[in-house]
Every structure is written in structure tokens, then in C-alpha cells.
Image (cartoon, rainbow, N blue to C red):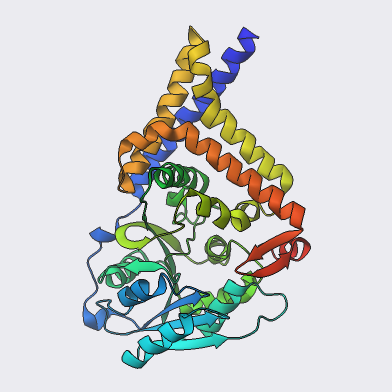
């Protein structure tokens, strides 16, 4: 038993060392948006900012104000009101009356074989005119120079697709524990620095900000290729890469920010539709992810009080590197690095969110997203 425990902890420690080296090499290669020199007026291509809104009356006004206050000479905002029942339609109507750059599109019914968000974004694209398309969400806030810098970054690197990694607003300690671990898991799971490597299969896409060259997006197949894809933002990055276009990722800091879900409870409820979908609705893969989380992120901490000698050394290496990496993620997201010490708590919460998403989806035979139910079999057929 002692030999098995030693070998297991040794293996976990080696994996953490490899991960730390990979992160240490990769993260410094990700450019910062703030380092890009903003484009001058005459160099700014026409841009369309596209987003879907369904019952977003609470968060939409402030986000929309930032979108319409960008320091950019040629852009439009195409907002699709996707069957909203709250004041979203009135908010968009009032804003459009004040600013002709805002174009409203209303969706009253959802066609078969479409998820609501991909369908709304497809409608936004079809009503847009920009040479470049920015896909975002109805609750995202932009700093005035974000667009100039993002387009400067794409042009200087020759990218057709750029994803910006912005900030998630965190208020309560629970949100900080959950979201700093989520950022840690996202970093390891996606390895953002690989998105710009044409020789790598790595890809990236986040819903808060993706800018895509219009011609490349059309060649890729538009959101029609993502009609039944729950994680459409990530898979947009995948399809762009597979189509042979050049992708990139950059750190935006506060230039792009969003208040995701308020409170841990809402976070758990809000990700129910996503987490099982992220594994392509494959039960075996979700089980592997959960076991991997428990082995890599919880087991070394649980072992520390009970082991001595080499097992203690290996457990300390694994736990120390895990804490250090999450502390670095915490710093980048604007919270105290001491949240790195909450690593095993965040891992347990993340594992529960994965398990809950899987159980609820399988039990109900599908997902409910913004009041619409989508059967699991149809979702599986739509996985990209």
C-alpha cells in the first residue's frame, strides 16, 4: 500500500511539474491588448458588433452604453431580441432611437433544429454590414479603445480570428473561490497560447469577445455550422482553425469585462447546460474529467496530513504547484493571490458542477436553455 501511494503521488507530482513548465512557457507568449497600438481613424475597417439578448433587461442597459461609447469611427451594433418577455425590446428601441448605429432585430419564433443563441447570432450576421464581426454577449462591458486595439492586434499578426480573455467581475468570497478555480481550469484545459500556432490542434473561443474577418466567417459556414452546438463560442474557434484560418488569443484585462452569474448558486444553475455539453455529452469523458480533478487537485491536499517521507515530498510538490498556479490566475483576474489556497475547495465545487450538469441532463433527457427545452439526442447530433 505504501509503495502504491508513493508511486501515485509521484505520478501526480510529475504531471504538475510538466503542467507548470508548459504554463510557464506558454502564458508569457500571450499578448496583452493594452500593448497594441490603437489603429488610427483612417486604418479602421468597418466593424459590426453582434449579440443576442433574451430577457436581459437587468444587465443590458449598462453594457449597451459601453458598446455605443466606443472610440471607433466606423462601426454598428446589431442586437437581436430573441423572444424576450421583459423590457429588453423597449430598452433596445429607446437606445436605437437615440443612436442610429444600433440596429434591432426581433425574433418571435425559433425554427426547428436551432438553439436560440446560435440562431440569433446568425440573424445578427445576416443584418450586418461590417468587414469584421465582433461576437459578444448582452452583458459585456467594453473600454472605449478596446476595438481599436483588438483590430490592431489582428492586423499586426495576420489573424482572421481573435479571442480576448477579459475579466469576470467577482464580488463575494464564494464567487472568487469558484471563478479563480474556473480560470485555472480554463487555462489548463484550453492552453490559450496554442490557438495562434497553426501546427497545433488547440483552439479558443469565448462568448465575451471574438472578432472574425467576415469573409473567413462566411467560408467557415457561419453559425449554421453551430446551429445545435451548446458551447458555440468555443466551437467557433474550433471551426475557424479547422477551416485553415489564423486564430489568436490575447489578454484584455479590464478592457472587456462581464458580471457572469451573481452568487455561487446562480453559477451552478447557470452552468448546468454547459458542463456536460463541453464533453460532447459523453458520459465516459465527463467521468474521466471528474476523476482527474479529484486525483490532481484534491488528493494531494487530502494526503498531506497522513503521509511522511517521499510521499509527503511528492504531495507537497503537487499541492504547492497547484496553489501557485491558481494564485497567479487570481492575480491576473484582479483578486488576492491568497485565493490560490482555496484550490481544493474550488476543485470539489467544479467536480460537483460537472456531476450535476451530467445528472440533470441525463435525467431530464436534454437541457433547458432560456425557457426552451432541447432533447439530448438532437443535441448530440449537433455537436461540432
On-image quarter of the C terminus: bottom right
Q: Is residue 279 above or below residue 76?
A: above
For the point 60% across and 41% down, the residue is 352
**Residue 30 in the figure: left or right of residue 372:** left
In the rendered image, residue 188, in percent from the top left (x then y), is placed at 48, 43
Does the image show residue 130?
Answer: no
Q: Quadrant of residue 118?
A: bottom right
On-image quarter of the N terminus: top right
**Residue 282 in the figure: left or right of residue 221:** right
For the point 60% across and 77% down, the residue is 119
Does the image show residue 263?
Answer: yes
Q: Quadrant of residue 143?
A: bottom left
For the point 24% across and 73% down, the residue is 39
In the rendered image, residue 207, in percent from the top left (x then y), is placed at 48, 64
In the rendered image, residue 232, in percent from the top left (x then y), is placed at 57, 65
Q: Is residue 65 above or below residue 288?
A: below
Amino acid at each position: 500500500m505504501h509503495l502504491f501511494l508513493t508511486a501515485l503521488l509521484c505520478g501526480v507530482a510529475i504531471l504538475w511539474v510538466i503542467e507548470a513548465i508548459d504554463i510557464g512557457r506558454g502564458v508569457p507568449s500571450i499578448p496583452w491588448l493594452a500593448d497594441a497600438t490603437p489603429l488610427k481613424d483612417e486604418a479602421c475597417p468597418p466593424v459590426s458588433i453582434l449579440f443576442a439578448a433574451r430577457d436581459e433587461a437587468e444587465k443590458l442597459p449598462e453594457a449597451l452604453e459601453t458598446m455605443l461609447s466606443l472610440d471607433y469611427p466606423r462601426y454598428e451594433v446589431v442586437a437581436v431580441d430573441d423572444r424576450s418577455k421583459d423590457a429588453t425590446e423597449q430598452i433596445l428601441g429607446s437606445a436605437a432611437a437615440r443612436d442610429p448605429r444600433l440596429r434591432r432585430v426581433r425574433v418571435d419564433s425559433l425554427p426547428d433544429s436551432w438553439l436560440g443563441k446560435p440562431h440569433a447570432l446568425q440573424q445578427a450576421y445576416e443584418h450586418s454590414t461590417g468587414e469584421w464581426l465582433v461576437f459578444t454577449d448582452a452583458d459585456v462591458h467594453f473600454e472605449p479603445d478596446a476595438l481599436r486595439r483588438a483590430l490592431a492586434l489582428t492586423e499586426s499578426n495576420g489573424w482572421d480570428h481573435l479571442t480576448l480573455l477579459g475579466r469576470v467581475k467577482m464580488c463575494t468570497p464564494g464567487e472568487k473561490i469558484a471563478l479563480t478555480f474556473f480560470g485555472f481550469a480554463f487555462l489548463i484545459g484550453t492552453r490559450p497560447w496554442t490557438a495562434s500556432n497553426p501546427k497545433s490542434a488547440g483552439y479558443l473561443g469565448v462568448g465575451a469577445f471574438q472578432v472574425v474577418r467576415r469573409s473567413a466567417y462566411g467560408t467557415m459556414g457561419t453559425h449554421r455550422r453551430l446551429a445545435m452546438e451548446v458551447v458555440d463560442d468555443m466551437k467557433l474557434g474550433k471551426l475557424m482553425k479547422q477551416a485553415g484560418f489564423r486564430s489568436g488569443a490575447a489578454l484584455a484585462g479590464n478592457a472587456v469585462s462581464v458580471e457572469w452569474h451573481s452568487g455561487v448558486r446562480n453559477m451552478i444553475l447557470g452552468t448546468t447546460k454547459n458542463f456536460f455539453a463541453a464533453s460532447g455529452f459523453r458520459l465516459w469523458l465527463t467521468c474521466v474529467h471528474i476523476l482527474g480533478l479529484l486525483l490532481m487537485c484534491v488528493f494531494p491536499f487530502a494526503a498531506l496530513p497522513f503521509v511522511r517521507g517521499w510521499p509527503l515530498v511528492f504531495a507537497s510538490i503537487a499541492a504547492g504547484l497547484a496553489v501557485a498556479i491558481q494564485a497567479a490566475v487570481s492575480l491576473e483576474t484582479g483578486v488576492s493571490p491568497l485565493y490560490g489556497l482555496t484550490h481544493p475547495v474550488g476543485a470539489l465545487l467544479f467536480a460537483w458542477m460537472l456531476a450535476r450538469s451530467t445528472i440533470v441532463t441525463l435525467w431530464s433527457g436534454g437541457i433547458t436553455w432560456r425557457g426552451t427545452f432541447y432533447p439530448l439526442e438532437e443535441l448530440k447530433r449537433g455537436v461540432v
